[in-house]
Amino acid sequence: MNVNQRPTVFLVDDHALIRAGLRAELSGHVDVIGEADEVAAAIEMIIERSPDVVLLDVHMPEGGGLAVLRAVTKVRPNVKFLALSVSDAAEDVIAVVRAGARGYVTKSIEGPELVEAITRTAAGDAVFSRRLAGFVLDAFANRPQENSFAPALDPELDQLTPREIEVLRLIARGYSYRDIAGQLEIAVKTVESHVSAVLRKLQLSNRYQLTNWATERHLL
Amino acid sequence: MKFSATSILRPDTPGRPQRPLRRKADGALLGGVCSGFARRLGISTRSVRIFTVILALFFALGVAAYMTLWILLPRQGEATSILTRTVNDRRDKEILFAVAIAVLTLLIAFITMGVGLPGVTLWFLALCCLAAVMVWRGASNDEKESLSQLSTDLAKLRIGRNDGWRAVALRTGFGIVFIIWGISLMSRVSGENGAAKFVLGGACALVLGLFVLFAPWWIRTFQDLSTERRARMRAQDRADMAAHVHDSVMQTLSLIQRAADDPQEVTRLARQQERDLRSWLANPEKFGAQSTSSRTLSQSILDVESEVEDNYGVSVDAVIVGDAPLDDSLLALIAACREATLNAAKWSGTREVAVFVEVEHDKVSVFVRDTGCGFDPTAVAADRQGVTGSIIERMRRHGGTATITSSPETGTEVELQLPRASHSS
């Protein structure tokens, strides 16, 4: 994507009202190049149009957002996904993030924030909500009694650096990336790279708690 | 060799010798043996059937041959025969073994009693029983389905599924024949040797007759009962759902209509209803059984969240990492957290308050943050109970700390830290 160009966005949601609302919020900031209300059509159209970012509803019939994500990523690995969830419950979204979404936002998000999240996704960065940050902190926490059961950890993937934990805590406390950069006296770009690193760990780590937590809720 | 006969062969070109011998799946009366034979030989199905019936008159040879072929020949479109399937299944083999013993016992009993049938016929019939059990156990799902269809049709005597006077007449005729036969056999009991077999045969015929007469009615009642039970369960579910929707959603909607000109009240009601519905969806059984005492930290924080939301119409979003059972100092922490949240809701001027709680093994941290107008913590008079007494002093009493950072640009954040006793990890 050219930096000066506006990102192209594709909407997937089974509620026409939500799609209309999103279109209205996004008009003038990004180019909405299509929308779909069911899994099969979404897969076909996204592969055909190859947008920068797909705004994906997590709760859809026929396999939902996960099915779209898996089918498209196989053919178009460059299409980035931003999950859209009504509930903000991490268990709804963790499977989508593990499957490759660059992050997620709730449907109650304000217009400018959504545009910022889309721009960030299009640039290849991660978008963490407060709750997702809280979940990651929980899942990667080092609790002594659990570690005795856990298999040998891969420190590259299964542990967060102190700085990453700091960033996640600030996100969970409700700070924006800019606030975090100010607080830690680092560049916004550095915050973004920390968050991307955490996202990578979240997607690739087979940490005991993560798998356990997700399978308990039949997500993987 | 495994292939589907239908896909290779034209169904209506008779007389092809290379056709494999298969039981026909469509147009079968019972197992499809006769029609399969007819196809193999290129002659009409009817003549094969008549031949089989004639053969059956000689010591039940036709029946035995039919049953044997039923289990030996694979069905059209299937790779294995019923025999190989039952023999390869351990459970089926056990059942078969038990049935074989029972049949053998009966056979010996009949031969010694002398039922009036030649021994060969009895052996053939015993073979048929075994084969029937095999069919029952080893038939493929497709075949089972068509057989069960056949059996309901037979029990109602609706041959060809045309319910009408013919079926009724046929059924009545069969029933009456069996009953008369039974009565005549039983009437011969007195003054004859070996009367038992007539009693036995007569009773069987009677029962058979009654069964044929009443089977349709009985089966229909049975089906109606289960349909009705299912319908009642569905109605029950619907009633529960309707009751819940009425209690919560409809009430809230009417409240919202009444408060239409007060956006704060509408938001509050909508938030409350949303939380309500979510907890109901997540756990419908436990819904309504409100926990009288929340016994863990996270539950208490969620209670604070909903209380402040309900009373002030702001959205409080709590993110909680970890959990811990409550004790005195944690109760104090929760009270301080509640006070901070209330202050943010009342004074900050924003609609959103972010609460973050993290339980670590050595401490519990709470952050209450809003992006509102902010205030000068040093300018708050020392006698103001809210901040000093409820938050700072309370935390200090329990060995914790409270830090308030506030500015007009970034809003206010209250940070509460409480060290944890080492016994609870």
Image (cartoon, helix red, strand yellow):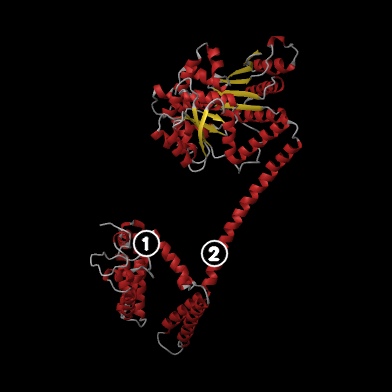
State the residue position of label 2: B223
State the residue position of label 1: B139
Callout 1: chain:
B
**Left or right side of B266 for B233:** left
How many neighbours does mark 1 have within 10 angstroms: few (below 14), some (14-19), or many (20 or more)? many
Residue under the image location 29 percent in, 78 percent down: B120
Q: Amino acid at mark 1?
A: Ala
Which of the pair A53/B52 is nearer the observer? A53
Q: Is residue B275 above or below residue B28?
A: above
The image shows residue A29 at horizontal and vertical percentages of: 55, 25
* SS category of the residue bearing label 2: helix
Q: Quadrant of residue A43?
A: top left
The image shows residue A11 at horizontal and vertical percentages of: 52, 34
What's the distance in space between the residues labelled 2 and 1, CA to CA? 24 Å
* SS category of the residue bearing label 1: loop
Residue under the image location 56 percent in, 19 percent down: A176
The image shows residue A60 at horizontal and vertical percentages of: 52, 40
Which of the pair B72/A8 is nearer the observer? A8
